[in-house]
Amino acid sequence: DIQMTQSPSSLSASVGARVTITCRASQSISSYLNWYQQKPGKAPKLLIYGASSFQGGVPSRFSGSGSGTDFSLTISTLQPEDFATYYCQQSYSTPYTFGQGTKLEIK
Amino acid sequence: QVQLQESGPGLVKPSETLSLTCTVSGGSINNYYWSWIRQPPGKGLEWIGYIHYSGSTNYFPSLKSRVTISVDTSKNQFSLKLGSVTAADTAVYYCARDNYYDTRGWWFDPWGQGALVTVSS
C-alpha cells in the first residue's frame, strides 16, 4: 500500500495568512493526488484533483502543486470559513489511501 | 446535480453484519465507479472499496474477507455489507462517486452526508 504522510498534523494561523500543507507519498504517484476539506460533522469536500486541477466552485485562493512524491496545498489568504481539516489522497493505485489529516485552527 | 444518501441501521451487534445502502439521485448510476469510505470517530479516512455499475469490485485488502459491495442499477443504488463486525468498525460510513480523467487519476465527488454506525451489544 502507498503511505501518505501530511505535515503538519495541526496548524494555527490567523485570518489573512498564507498557509501551506504538505503531503508526501511513500512512492511516486505521478500527479494522482487529491485534496479534500472536511468541516466538523460534514462529509469531505473535494478541493483539488490531479494535484493541481480545481474543482468547480472552489475559491481561487486554494492551489495545489507537486508531482512524484511531494505535494502541497496552499491557501493564499485565509478566510474564516477555511478553518477545517484537510486530507490528501492518492489514486495512483488501489487501495486508495489518505493522509492522516491536517487540522487548521484559528490563532 | 447528483446527490448520494446513505441509509441503514445505526447500531449493529458485535459479530453481526453491517449493511448500508447508498441511493443515487439526480443522475444515473451507470457508467461510473462508486466507493465506500469510512471514518472512525475522531480519526482519518479509510477507503473500503469500489464497485463499477457493471458489478466489478475492488476492496481494501485488510477488509476483503469481510466486505461485499453490490449494485442494483434498476434502483440506482449500491450497497455495503461488512461481516463479523467489532467495535473497531464503529465509524461514519460515506458513499461517493469515483471520477476519472486521464493524467489526473481518480477522485471522490460528490459524497453522501455519511451514516454513523456503532458496533455495540
Image (spheres, coloured by chain):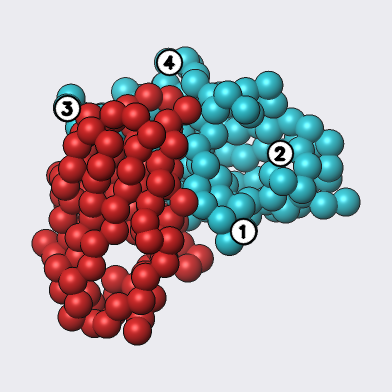
Chain colours: A red, B cyan
For the residues labelled 3 and 2, the Cα–Cα distance comes to 36 Å
Nearest to N terminus: mark 4 or mark 3: 4
Q: Residue furthest left?
A: A60
Residue pointed to by mark 1: B41
At horizontal 74% and vertical 31% (from top left) the residue drawn is B83
Q: Which residue is mark 3?
A: B103
Parent chain of label 3: B
Q: Which mark is residue B54?
A: 4
Q: Secondary structure at mark 2?
A: strand
The three-letter code of the residue at mark 1 reads Pro
Gap between marks 2 and 4, in whole Å?
23 Å
Same subunit, tags 4 and 3: yes
Q: Helix, strand, or loop for circle 3?
A: loop
The image quarter in which residue B43 lies: bottom right
The reply to whether callout 2 and callout 4 are in contact (CB within 8 Å) is no
Chain letter for mark 2: B
Cα distance in 3D space between marks 4 and 3: 24 Å
Position in image of residue B7 (x %, y %)? 59, 47
Residue at the extreme right of the image, as rendered: B121
Amino acid type of the residue that numbered disc 2 sits on in the rendered structure: Leu
User: Which of the numbered marks, if any, corresponds to residue B18?
Assistant: 2
Q: Earlier in the sequence, mark 4 or mark 1?
A: 1
Give the class, few, some or many, for how many residues have Cα within 10 Å of label 1's Cα (few <14, many ≥20): few
Disc 4 or disc 3, which is closer to the eye? 3
Q: Is residue B28 left or right of residue B91?
A: left
Horizontally, residue B91 falls left or right of residue B96, namely right
